[in-house]
Amino acid sequence: MANDADLLEVVRLLDNACKEAGFFYVKGHGITESLMKEVRDVTRKFFQLPYEEKLKIKMTPQSGYRGYQRIGENVTKGKPDMHEAIDCYTPIRPGKYGDLAKPMEGSNLWPENPTNFEELLENYINLCRDLSRKIMRGIALALGGAIDAFEGETAGDAFWVLRLIGYPVDIPEEQRTDTGCGAHTDYGLLTLVNQDDDICALEVQNRSGEWIYATPIPGTFVCNIGDMLKVWSNGIYQPTLHRVVNNSPRYRVSVAFFYESNFDAAIEPVQFLPGENWRCREVRKGCVWGALGKESPDELRHVISWVQPCGCGGKNALKLLYL
Ligand SMILES: O=C(O)CCC(=O)C(=O)O
């Protein structure tokens, strides 16, 4: 960090952005524009491979839902999304969280070509994780907490998800729906989107209900806050609906990094905030589809949580649904 005045100014801007839009651009973050482009380029090359080749890393329950998803396999609010993707999650070794994470145990499936795919992506993931942690430090200050309020037991061992996404344009009529990714909020803390520089397709609903483009700005990430931060901030910050519609004549690539709490953290308002706490409305026993408002078993990318029977709060209240 530079001096205190600069730090306070960044915290003030973060606070405004989280309160007023739920979306903002991040620049000056230290991840080079060339690395951001290289990650999109290898992703594009993978999606250009024949289908049989892509199926070599197919997502299955055995891989802990990691791997390749064909177009339409990801479903948002009951409608197939017009994208293909590789989904990666924090590797979880068997037994690390007992029964809690059983469906998510496993390691990521990486394409064999180019040969540096795995190394490149692992480096990129580490950088995105560090950047997200820094943003969460700013958010902790913005909420009036200690700088490390979202570390240790809350997000010191953050679970992350990386989605490498391709939005084709030449989809047969009978298969086509109107959205690359249907309108949704993200369920985690923060998302960092690295999108193609020359295609406008990510749309965000502003507070007047209009859809506006998150126009690409080279070298920046589009960052948005998710449902978990709404709960942690006791509703002070609200996530924003967004969707992807690729109306351009070109294939679009984006790489979305989702930063979440520790896998076994309780999602409940943090102690240092004023006001009446959100209350737990419903906790469904044995439900892996615990992301807020995203309850369809088809929504594979939302498989992260195993909601335990519990009272409100408490160690085994992994993901709480809230009023
Ligand atoms: O492709 C994008 O720009 C954003 C994707 C997205 O919203 C998501 O995967 O949740």
Image (cartoon, rainbow, N blue to C red):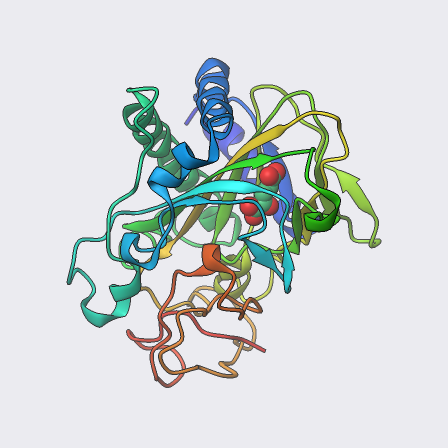
Ligand 1 falls in quadrant: top right
Q: Relative to the observer, which residue lies in front, 306 or 178?
A: 178
What residue is rendered at 38% in x and 45% in y? 58
Q: Relative to the observer, which residue lies in front, 321 or 109?
A: 109
Could you say which quadrant of the image residue 82 lies in?
top right
Could you say which quadrant of the image residue 61 lies in?
bottom left
Residue 276 at x, y = what percent? 55, 77
Residue 320 in the figure: left or right of residue 25: left
- Residue farthest left in this picture: 95
- Residue farthest top in this picture: 34
In which quadrant will I find the N terminus?
A: top left
What residue is rendered at 62% in x and 50% in y? 81
Q: Relative to the observer, which residue lies in front, 278 or 62?
A: 62
Q: Is residue 61 above or below residue 257?
A: below
Could you say which quadrant of the image residue 60 lies in?
bottom left
What residue is rendered at 72% in x and 41% in y? 245
What residue is rendered at 52% in x and 30% in y? 5
Residue 126 at x, y = what percent? 32, 33
In which quadrant will I find the C terminus?
A: bottom right
Residue 159 at x, y = what percent? 34, 51
Residue 263 at x, y = what percent? 31, 59
State the count of labels.
0
- Say whether residue 288 is visible: yes
Residue 110 in the figure: left or right of residue 322: left
- Say whether residue 12 is visible: no
